[in-house]
Amino acid sequence: MAKKQTVHVKINGRERQADVEPRLLLVHFIREVLGLTGTHVGCDTSNCGACTVVLDGKTVKSCTVFAVQADGAELLTVEGLLQDGKLHPLQEGFKQEHGLQCGFCTPGMLMSTYALLKKNSQPSEEEIRWGISGNLCRCTGYQNIVKAVQYAAGKLAEGGAR
Amino acid sequence: MIPASFEYLRPKTVSEAIGLLQQHGDDAKILSGGQSLIPMMKLRLARPGYLIDINRVPGLSYVKEEGGYLKIGGLTREAELEGSPVVHSKYPIIVDTAHVIADPQVRNLATVGGNLAHGDPANDHPATMLALGAQVVATGPKGERVIPIENFFLSIFSTALQPDEILTEIRIPIPPPRSGGAYFKLERKVGDFATAAVAAQITFDDQGVCQEAGIGLTNVGPTPIKARKAEEFLRGKRLDEANIKQAAQLAAEESEPSADLRGPVEYKKGLVKELAKRALTRARERAGK
């Protein structure tokens, strides 16, 4: 077994660290070592985007990054969206607009659209669809996800800036 | 899927990384964006004993015009390339290409250097770099050497890089006035490799005659293909519909696709012809002719 290495991250505002094997994938580090199971393993082949997290401000597929690569990084997962016990406008949007059915893809969808709205607060429908092009949903047909993001963009514009 | 065990090394400089490559030889791999390598490791198609992570080596990520070239650092992310102002204003063919590589999350990590050094004929930058007449800078124990892109791809997953060399920069000659280029790709869905794709770059003289033509083909052979006959045919000609059609036909004849789940050989050759027509037409428009 390869030598373990210490990985230190700031995840959802909290400092965490652990010694891990280099081959441990970031998604398993988040779920199994840190115990944050909101991030899902879907295809495990870099296609579906269910494992999407925000790493130093950019979305990545955490099944295609080693935990050791994230040493020193800031991470945001779906658990970090809730603030002061209140849903993020995106979470509210997915609820109001039925942006999910089974919910398996939702954590990844939320992280991709969170990063999208950070970069572009008023995206067009096409920009939203392009923004979630790395996330697969087999339930909604995407229509309600687009509406959910539009809902959130509207809420954030009203002054609920997060 | 869990990759085989490996030792993780994180050099701080290029020379330190090269030293590690010399030390560990064939048992080492460079980890750049990792978006091709990590999936291969998870499938155990790659089992390096040592992974040399160059992501924290400073000075390898940039896009700038200098000394007659557009210079792209090997570690430049696809997302950075896509967002680069100079690329946007002057190199629409590169925007076309970066935009259709995988998906947004993958583009946040995937690097231009990795896209070339991986040597996968299904990757998108090789065809575009062939069309643009790019050069690759390989840095090794003896310093830098420059490899013309047309000599870079040897066979599937194999390039002219030596085991102790790192691809540190891509140089694209700044196109003269009256130049234009485009990349057209057909993929079954976002994130899939190209069924086929064509890159075309054209330079006209002041009479509207084609002076220089570069055409590269994606995923229709064991390596990325430079469509030399089609390029040669266009030099000295006007890009009217008949000539574009003839060049596209030649490019299709130069392609060597194999049948797979994306389609049979005839279909892919037909696709090369159609995509070449579209890429040449768009290149002509962008050159202002």
Image (cartoon, coloured by chain):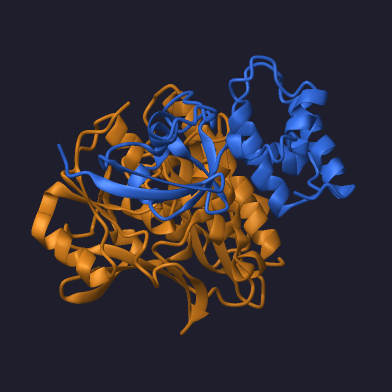
Chain colours: A blue, B orange
Q: Residue at x 63, y 23 (%)?
A: A137
Q: Residue at x 60, y 50 (%)?
A: B279
Quadrant position of the N terminus of chain B in the picture: top left
**Which residue is the extreme one toward the front?**
A84
The percent position of residue A66, horizontal first and vertical second, equals: 35, 42
Q: Residue at x 16, y 57 (%)?
A: B163
In this picture, residue B56 sits left or right of residue A92? left
Quadrant position of the C terminus of chain B in the picture: bottom right
The percent position of residue B48, horizontal first and vertical second, equals: 19, 43
Q: How many marks?
A: 0
Q: Nearer the viewer, residue B133 or B101?
A: B101
Q: Nearer the viewer, residue A105 or A138?
A: A105
Depicted B91 relative to depicted A159: above or below: below
The percent position of residue B151, horizontal first and vertical second, equals: 28, 60
In this picture, residue B243 sits left or right of residue B72? right
The percent position of residue B80, horizontal first and vertical second, equals: 55, 60
**Which residue is the extreme one toward the right?**
A158
